Image (tube, grey):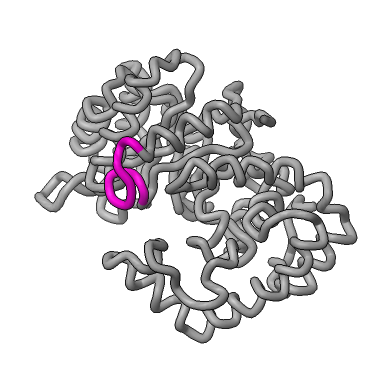
Amino acid sequence: MEYRYLGASGLQVSALSLGAWVTYGEQVGEEVALTCMEAAYKEGVNFFDNAEAYGRGNAETVMGSVIKKMGWKRSDLVISTKIFWGGRVPNATGLSRKHIIEGMDASLARLQMDYVDLVFCHRPDIYTPIEETVRAMNFLIDQGMAFYWGTSEWSARQIIEAYGIARREHLIPPIMEQPQYNMFERERVEKEYAHLYKEIGLGTTIWSPLASGLLTGKYNDGIPEGSRMAMENYGWLRDMLKSEEGQQRLAKVKQLAPLAEELGCTLAQLALAWCLKNPQVSTVITGASRAEQVSANMKALDVVEKLTPAVMERIEAILQNKPEPESDFR
């Protein structure tokens, strides 16, 4: 396993990590989650990502139970959660001081932990002043409930504002962002955030590297039973696949397949390696519903060195979506 520093911090996270989105508490239960997390741990994964919204809290409960059952040393792990969607009643959603503190208390109880290493503001909150959020996040760290804080799907402007407030008030600034990033979603990571990597030392823990499974090739011939797109609550994914843009993306996936075969890897491994190739990516969050998927995903690390400049040019020729002006991405 390769380990990368999380932005300008001294924290090292595994280049490939495991997330609980969709699967834990919904698609799979504790027994399957245990086998997936165990497989990841054996491969050297130390970062496990979660959120209060995943499975309406069940994902945190499952992950916490697995870690306790496995008896892993807490200091060997990097655990995250994200705060925003905690419920449907007033003050259970958003980034107010009240919800951030109470939401963190609830997350820690479900995880059966005294602290998380990372806590993210799961989305920007247009109704709460950013200064209130910055002060609440600083409080969590001061109280030992979290070690680092960051954002998820915030604009560069919002991140800079939060960073500036923290510096002005002598508080702890955000150190990482969790954006979507894959072969089809590139603008934010490669263009919008380009100046933040040097200016504030922003780290990234990217999600959806396989574009909700599209880049695995499993949807090339339809929607398989038991897949994420077949789930009742994910009709929006099916609609995306059926759209004109979805069909265009599917056509590109089919063009990438021969290249993956030529490199001796799967489409998923190629897509993960492509994300890892970006030096601004601290860690790539993978998902899995079977231990075999975890083991297969980890082999993407061996593909990165095969992505020579010539191969990357061939990929760009297929994707035709490189942001301009480009960032330091190579």
Q: Nearer the viewer, residue 105 or 169?
A: 105
Q: Nearer the viewer, residue 120 or 307?
A: 307
Q: Nearer the viewer, residue 11 or 66?
A: 66
Q: Position of residue 209 (x, y in %)?
A: 57, 54
Question: Start and end of the magenta stretch?
Answer: 23-31
Q: Position of residue 273 (x, y in %)?
A: 70, 49
Q: Is residue 167 visible?
A: no
Residue for point 54% across, 66% down: 218
327 relative position to 310: left or right:
left
Residue for point 34% across, 27% down: 66
Q: Nearer the viewer, residue 84 or 22?
A: 22
Residue 134 position (above or below residue 147): below
Residue for point 48% across, 26% down: 78
In the rendered image, the residue lying farthest to the bottom is 244
Q: Is residue 279 magenta?
A: no
Q: Position of residue 40 (x, y in %)?
A: 53, 33
